[in-house]
Amino acid sequence: MISVRNLTVTHGRRPAVHHVSFSLAPGSLTAVVGPNGAGKSTLLRALAGLHPPSEGRIEGLNAGDVALLPQQAQMDRGFPLSCRDAVAFGLWRESGGFRAVRDLRRVEAALEAVGLQGFARRPVGTLSAGQFQRVLFARLLLQDAPVILLDEPFNALDARTSADLLAVMRRWHGEGRTILAVLHDLDLVRREFPDTLLLARDAIAFGPTEQALSAENRLRARMMAEAWAEDAGTCQRAA
């Protein structure tokens, strides 16, 4: 069980995640939705141990148990790196640095599993958005983590790539991994995700997807987003 209790995460003094509490059961499949600027990416970074909380705590989660897929828009593809090398970083914890490149069969098997057979030597800078996302999913395959955090994993992808990567996600879920994914497509959320966290810096709703995404809850999230004061500081709230 992963428990988030009274979590506040700030950028400077501005709260991006504000007194949020929820729990994830082992093997659960949960979407995170909310308006732009709601703190969704910041929450995932905090869970991955990349952004320390200002208040509150995260229990039942070790950094070594987490694999994070960041947004593509946050990544620099200008570095001269092959698909093989990019995927091999998934073995960093196990093998350390570029020594992981020696395990070519596992790297190439991961590329093949996401539909990129024969792409090992291709520079990542020459890939389409969909092909690059497949590379990132292949890297997650090699990380083999029990907890997977996905930040907009299907954004701006063609239908075939989305379907292929959804199949990978379903396989992870079938293996009992805990998955938390930031998404904007509410139809996809309703179709694929049993549980949803509706976030607007505060947790508006958490639970079964249809209940969390009720019209009333979505209106509350929108109204809260419209009322945000960008210069507001953090407040104190009892745990």
Image (cartoon, rainbow, N blue to C red):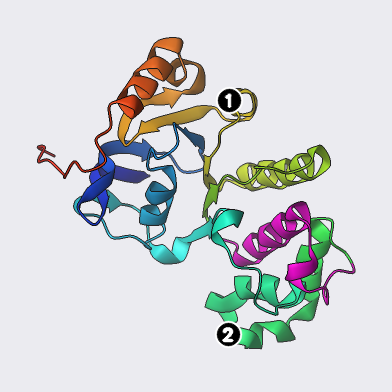
Q: Which residue is at a point 65% across and 77% down the rendered structure image?
A: 79
Cβ atoms under marks 2 and 1 closer than 8 Å:
no
User: In the image, residue 236 lies at what x, y percent?
Assistant: 9, 41
Q: Which residue is at a point 58% across and 63% down the rendered structure image?
A: 75
Closer to the camera in the image, 44 or 226: 226
Q: Which residue is at a point 60% across and 62% down the rendered structure image?
A: 144
Quadrant of res 114: bottom right
- Seen in the picture, residue 127 relative to 14 is either above or below; the reply is below
Q: Say whether residue 135 is magenta.
A: yes
User: In the image, residue 146 lies at what x, y percent?
Assistant: 52, 55
Quadrant of res 85: bottom right
Q: Say whether residue 70 is magenta.
A: no
Amino acid type, residue under disc 2 in the picture = Gly
Which residue is labeled 1 in the image? Answer: 186
- Seen in the picture, residue 81 relative to 45 is either above or below; the reply is below
Magenta segment: 118-145
Q: What element carries label 2?
A: helix
Q: How far apart are marks 2 and 1 (CA)?
A: 38 Å
Amino acid type, residue under disc 1 in the picture = Leu
- Disc 1 packing (10 Å; few <14; some 14–19; many ≥20): some
The kind of secondary structure the magenta stretch mainly shows is helix
In the picture as drawn, the residue positioned furthest to the right comes out as: 118
Closer to the camera in the image, 169 or 152: 152
- Disc 2 packing (10 Å; few <14; some 14–19; many ≥20): some
Quadrant location, the N terminus: top left
Left or right: residue 57 versus residue 225 is left
Q: What element carries label 1?
A: helix
Give the number of the disc on residue 97: 2
User: In the image, residue 95 lies at what x, y percent?
Assistant: 59, 82
Which is nearer the N-term, disc 2 or disc 1? 2
